[in-house]
Image (spheres, rainbow, N blue to C red):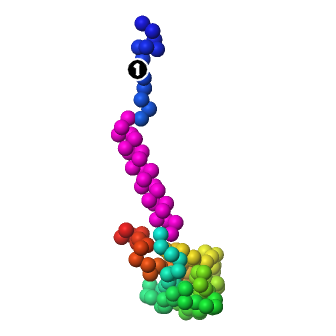
Amino acid sequence: MNKKSSEKKRKYFAFPDVFVLSFVVIVALVCVCMSFGIGTDDDLTAVVYVDGNEYTRITLNSVDEPYEINVHGELETSIRISSEGVGFVSSDCPDKLCVNTGTLTKAGESAVCLPARVSLKLVSTSSSVPDAVAG
């Protein structure tokens, strides 16, 4: 008997394999779509927290000219607010990690100055953007 004819043809993918692979690809596409901005950037709100309590809330599309606010937490920090985003400009903290975070521009981004106990978070007021925790 011929050696080639005695070997069965090997299937590379069986039906369950194709089903699982398709499911994984679909889930990956949904995750990518959700992370690249469902909703608009026109409805971003910057929320500033001091000692875990909300200090102020600013809707970015209402900002005409960029400005800075000084926040007095454990240490003094300065935050720049503009229609494009929000970020720490200066802080009395020793490591300046908060300042090096840069400008927050997308919903869900956040920056924290731990020594000053001040944090920033960008949230979307649009209901079409899913919450990362609740879905």
**Is 1 a magenta residue?**
no
Q: Secondary structure at mark 1?
A: loop
Report if residue 22 lies within the magenta region.
yes
Q: Position of residue 114 (x, y in %)?
A: 53, 80
Percent across and percent down for residue 5 are 43, 14
Name the kind of residue labelled 1 in the image: Lys
Which residue is most to the top?
1
Split into 4 quadrants, where in the image is the N terminus? top left
Q: Quadrant of residue 127?
A: bottom left
Q: Which quadrant is the C terminus positioned in?
A: bottom left
Q: Which residues are magenta?
A: 14-37
Q: Is residue 111 left or right of residue 9?
A: right
Q: Nearer the viewer, residue 73 or 43?
A: 43
Quarter of the figure with residue 128: bottom left
Q: From this viewpoint, is residue 118 visible?
A: no
Q: In the image shown, does 67 or 6 lie closer to the viewer?
A: 6
Q: Is residue 105 left or right of residue 24?
A: right
Q: Which residue is mark 1?
A: 8
At horizontal 45% and vertical 60% (from top left) the residue drawn is: 31
